[in-house]
Image (cartoon, rainbow, N blue to C red):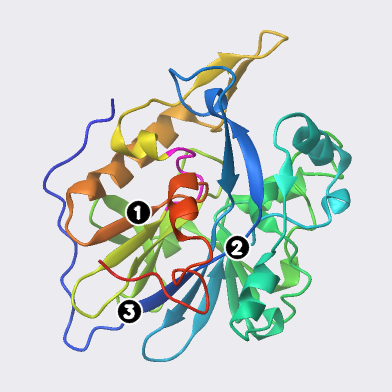
């Protein structure tokens, strides 16, 4: 069980504090065998999970960004290596893409200013093509895994053309210059304490989260991406699964289990902080409670 720190303090709001209005976006559904991500579950347990994405708007300037792009509707456009994985392990259902979800609120992908990707796995990159005017923002380590992705390596699960490189900002270590609460490396994106991009190591190189204020008087939301695939990891009820495949190779849903466990521990410490909401990308319970409701754009996730 993860140890949870008790005395986390977040910066208080400034006078006339800016914040982010945050809405959930549909990003498709995928099946995840539970035994691949947490310990102590039946081998037959498979959870139908969303690939949650989010639309964030700055309360003062109206600046806006999308966090993650979900799953592509045209699965056939993924490289064969990813198509094989989807067929064998992660069947998908994409009734509504991120552009579709934005369109429900009267917003076109060509109007999006910024797309922040938590990481470059296939169920988060969506289709970048409709976002013709957006600057893409990713963790700096994404650069190296793009260079070694498909087609350079036909077996890779990283798509080399996932993002438009000429419109992408790769965050450097020096960008993560602010410490906030349990997170030692964050980037104050707007420079006013309204939203932080958090260095969240462990799952995949370049993995980042978002920690945003959702009111002027002290409410927050933490968007954890794939830091954890099951909320029981955040609460400490379960531990990260490690298993052997048919060839006897050790398999884990995270590239670095120890770093991932530390990131999860830091996120879990927020459970004891008042007015902080934590959402993971594949949170099936939250999705089933809120799908089709006001938490999805054009509505807004209510602050705590």
| Residue at mark 1 to residue at mark 3: CA–CA distance | 16 Å
Please tell me the numbered disc located at residue 278.
1
Please tell me the numbered disc located at residue 45.
none
The image position of residue 137, as x and y in percent, is 58, 66
Residue at 72%, 55% in the rendered image: 94
Q: Which comes sooner in the sequence, label 1 or label 3?
A: 3
Q: Main secondary structure of the magenta part?
A: loop
How crowded is the residue under tag 1: few (<14 C-alpha within 10 Å), some, or many (20+)? Answer: some
| Quarter of the image with the N terminus in it | top left
| Residue at mark 3 to residue at mark 2: CA–CA distance | 23 Å
Q: Quadrant of residue 278?
A: bottom left
170 drawn magenta: no
Residue 125 appearing in the image = yes
Please tell me the numbered disc located at residue 19.
3
How crowded is the residue under tag 3: few (<14 C-alpha within 10 Å), some, or many (20+)? Answer: many
- Asked which secondary structure carries label 1, the reply is strand
- Give 253 or 96, whichever is nearer the viewer: 96
| Vertical order, 206 against 252 (above or below) | below
User: For the magenta stretch, what is the residue range?
Assistant: 224-230
The image position of residue 252, as x and y in percent, is 56, 25
């Amino acid at each position: 069980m993860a140890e949870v720190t008790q005395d986390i303090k977040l910066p208080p709001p400034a006078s006339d504090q800016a914040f982010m209005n945050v809405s959930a976006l549909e990003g498709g559904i995928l099946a995840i065998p539970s035994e691949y991500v947490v310990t102590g579950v039946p081998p037959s347990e498979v959870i139908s999970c969303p690939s949650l994405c989010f639309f964030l708007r700055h309360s003062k300037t109206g600046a806006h960004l999308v966090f993650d792009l979900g799953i592509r509707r045209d699965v056939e456009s993924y490289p064969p290596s990813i198509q094989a994985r989807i067929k064998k392990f992660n069947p998908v259902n994409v009734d509504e893409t991120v552009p579709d979800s934005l369109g429900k609120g009267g917003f076109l992908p060509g109007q999006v200013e910024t797309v922040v990707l938590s990481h470059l796995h296939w169920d988060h990159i969506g289709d970048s093509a409709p976002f013709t005017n957006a600057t893409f923002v990713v963790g700096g380590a994404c650069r190296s895994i793009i260079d070694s992705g498909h087609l350079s390596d036909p077996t890779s699960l990283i798509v080399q053309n996932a993002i438009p490189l000429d419109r992408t900002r790769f965050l450097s270590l020096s960008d993560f210059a602010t410490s906030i609460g349990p997170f030692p490396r964050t980037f104050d994106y707007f420079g006013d304490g309204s939203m932080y991009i958090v260095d969240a190591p462990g799952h995949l190189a370049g993995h980042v989260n978002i920690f945003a204020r959702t009111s002027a008087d002290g409410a927050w939301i933490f968007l954890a991406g794939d830091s954890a695939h099951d909320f029981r990891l955040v609460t400490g009820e379960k531990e990260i699964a490690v298993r052997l495949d048919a060839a006897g190779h050790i398999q884990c849903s995270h590239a670095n289990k120890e770093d991932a466990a530390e990131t999860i521990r830091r996120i879990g410490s927020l459970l004891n902080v008042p007015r902080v909401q934590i959402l993971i990308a594949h949170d099936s319970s939250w999705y089933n409670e809120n799908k089709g409701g006001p938490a999805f754009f054009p509505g807004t996730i209510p602050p705590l």
